[in-house]
Amino acid sequence: MNVTLEDLRDEWQRKLGTTSEMIRDDWMERHRERIRKSPAFGAFEMIVWIATLAMLGHFLATHAEQPALFATAFVLDAWVIAMGAIALRQQQALRALDYGLPVIELQAKVEAIRISRIRTFNWGFLTGQVVWWIPFAVVVFAALTGVDLWQSPGFVVFAAWNLAFGLAFIPLSIWVARSFGPRLSKLKAVRYFVDSIAGRDIAQARVFLEKLRRFDSAPA
């Protein structure tokens, strides 16, 4: 059997292609494992979330006959449930990524999840500074002392002013972000802070996909 130079070249290219595919698959598997071990909504966050829901649920059950306290705790409970559910959904979206897709498409999907997380943080912060000030103080004070602050003289007026300032802060913050955000985003410290908000798993995914893009575009 005669083996030509073309046969040797084809066999060598086939082996190179197989090796490259194996390296790529190994990268993907190790990346999936890193994502699994460093979730944005990890074990500690899950424990805190469940414990908070349990405490608020107990408060709601024991104050069902006090409408003001019940409504206050209900607002807190709804906020906690919503933020946790969104975080879990975003984490699941990252874990469910199909790494068999083209790298550019994967990068777009990861970037969309990153932007979604940042927006969730922004709205969580803006609404949380309303929810986690007066309502939180009312619920904690009632749970610890049994005193309903809504019945205290002058507290309703004080709470109304705080609520008004908190609501006014939301459009002001949005305006500042839209007006100065593009300029501030050029600063390295700001970019690092934004990436920290998005989560370590998102940062790892972006780094991995950039390496994969360079690997795929490298000449054979």
Image (cartoon, helix red, strand yellow):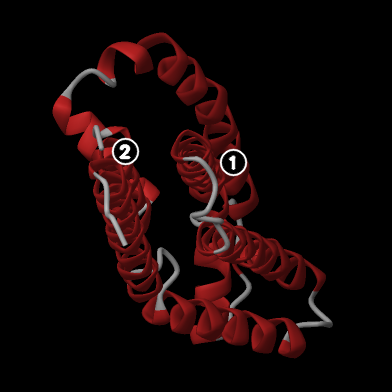
Q: Nearer the viewer, residue 23 or 168?
A: 23
Mark 1 or 2 closer to N-term?
A: 1
Residue at x 40% of width, y 73% of height: 36
Q: Which residue corresponds to the image point at 34% horizontal and 53% vertical from the top-left?
A: 14
Is the C terminus in the top left, top right, bottom left or bottom right quadrant?
Answer: top left
**Front of the two marks 1 and 2:** 2
In-front residue for pair 35/196: 35
Residue 75 percent location from the top left of the image: 69, 61
Mark 1 is on which residue type? Answer: Leu
Q: CA distance from mark 1 to mark 2?
A: 27 Å
Dot 2 corresponds to which residue? 194
Question: In the image, 46: left or right of 213?
Answer: right
* Depicted 80 relative to depicted 217: above or below: below
In the rendered image, residue 191, in percent from the top left (x then y), is placed at: 25, 32
Please give left or right for residue 96 compared with residue 60 in the image. left
Residue 204, percent across and down? 29, 54
Q: Secondary structure at mark 2?
A: helix
**Which residue bears the numbered disc 1?**
163
Q: What is the x, y in percent for residue 146?
A: 58, 85
Q: Which residue is drawn at the image coordinates 40% and 74% (left, top)?
A: 42
Q: Residue at x 38, y 47 (%)?
A: 198
Neighbours of disc 2 within 10 Å: few (<14), some (14-19), many (20+): some
Residue in front for this viewpoint, 6 or 174: 6
User: Which residue is at the far left?
Assistant: 188
Residue 40's label in the rendered image is: none
Question: What amino acid is at disc 2?
Answer: Val
For disc 1, the neighbor class at 10 Å (few under 14, some 14 to 19, many from 20) is some
> Would you place residue 175 above or below residue 204 in this image?
above
Outermost residue to the front: 1
